[in-house]
Amino acid sequence: MNHIHKKTAAAFMFAALIFSQTQAQDKSNLLGQLNTITTAVPFLMISPDARAGGMGDAGVASEPDAHAIHWNPAKMSFYNGKGIGSVSYTPWLRSLVNDIYLAYATGYIKPSPDQAIGGSIRYFSLGQIDFTDVNGGSLGSFNPSEFALDVAYSRKLSEDFSGGIALRYIHSNLTGGIPVPGGISSKAGNSVAADIAVYYQKDVEVGKKPAVFSWGLAITNIGSKISYTETGDKDFIPINLRFGPSLKLKLNDYNELTINLDFNKLLVPTPPIYSSDSAGNNLILYGKDPKVGVAAGIFQSFSDAPDGFKEELKEINIAGGLEYWYDKQFAFRTGYFFESAQKGNRKYFTLGAGLRYSVFGLDFSYLIPTQQRNPLENTLRFSLSFKFGDTGKERESGE
């Protein structure tokens, strides 16, 4: 009897070993592949201005400018002036079409030295699209578009630290009511969202030279899901965590150099790896169920990658940039953006330039992809900024 038990135990251990090896082989085949996180209204994550666009799309802790509402609304109260505004234009897929673009207008004022209030509007046009049914019959033409309206407030909480919030209304009309495949009626998607942010700025010395160190953190687009049909599932909007430091070195009376670094992570569920049972039902092999609420999705996003912690690290995009100013009038910028090949493989260099004259400023940026094609390659985008009120202090700050 004891001999039979030993045989049974040996067979069980052998079967378990074969099963574990098979599972490990299957896991190695399934994991490590492309697993991009997708959301609705991705236009909210496009860098809207040419200044940050020239620095690898880094801006959470850069010196406060007109575009603070997008990158970190807490920066507004540290702007050294009475107010500033800007308009920006970003062509999209210009090598293929000429009617897709992002337009952005933003600005804020400082009613007192320790607080600021502002707003912005972002409009994304997808150009004219001809819709057809499954048989190729025409359903008409439509110009899909999306926009977001923001209001923002920032206040200094101490001499070196500030907080900020922004409220956002999002409207996305992709079909103009034209039925989607299956005869299901479509509609425009709507959502409301909020940003919360903090910013720290301190005068320091580096190598016996004056410098300004700052860091910022912003959680943006915390809001409701969007649906484009009455019966369809709702999609997450791009809730995002952005944080990073910045260091501005005052080399001498005429030369300044700033180093910026941003880390970004989407706070939405990672797609799991599915398998099908004999009845055709989807079963989650690795990862977690992405069909959760907004709050649960935010917390889940830190631990739901199918390949565990190493895949979670790959979901952090890195953006870094340099900005050089001569006599607070001429700027040159460069930067690099890195995204893991498993999460989309966006990798590109950026170049930029800036001019300041009196109350006006003009910025340009250009993107050079190093991996896959990019919608912004071979295009020049620009921003025009203008200051409100007395500009004496603003000239001293380099804005």
Image (spheres, rainbow, N blue to C red):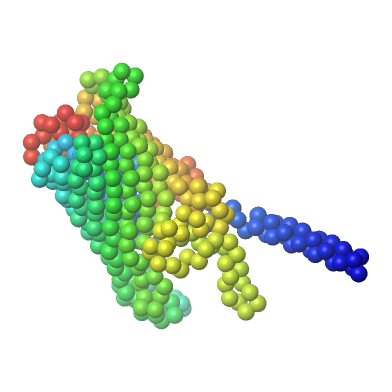
Residue 61 in picture, x, y percent from top left: 31, 39
Residue 112 in picture, x, y percent from top left: 10, 43
* Residue 52 in view (yes/no): no
Front position in the image: 382 or 325: 325
Left or right placement of residue 37 versus residue 33 in this view = left
Residue 285 in picture, x, y percent from top left: 60, 64
Quarter that holds the C terminus: top left
Q: What is the residue that sits farthest to the front in this orientation?
A: 2
Left or right placement of residue 37 versus residue 100 in this view = right
* Residue 302 in view (yes/no): yes
Front position in the image: 14 or 185: 14
Quarter that holds the N terminus: bottom right
Residue 166 in picture, x, y percent from top left: 24, 54
Q: Residue at x 29, y 66 (%)?
A: 191
Using the image, determine if residue 276 lies above or below residue 117: below
Q: Residue at x 29, y 20 (%)?
A: 209
Left or right placement of residue 371 versus residue 144 in this view = right
Q: Residue at x 60, y 56 (%)?
A: 31
Q: What is the residue that sits farthest to the bottom in this orientation?
A: 183
Q: Residue at x 32, y 42 (%)?
A: 216
Q: What is the residue that sits farthest to the left in this orientation?
A: 390
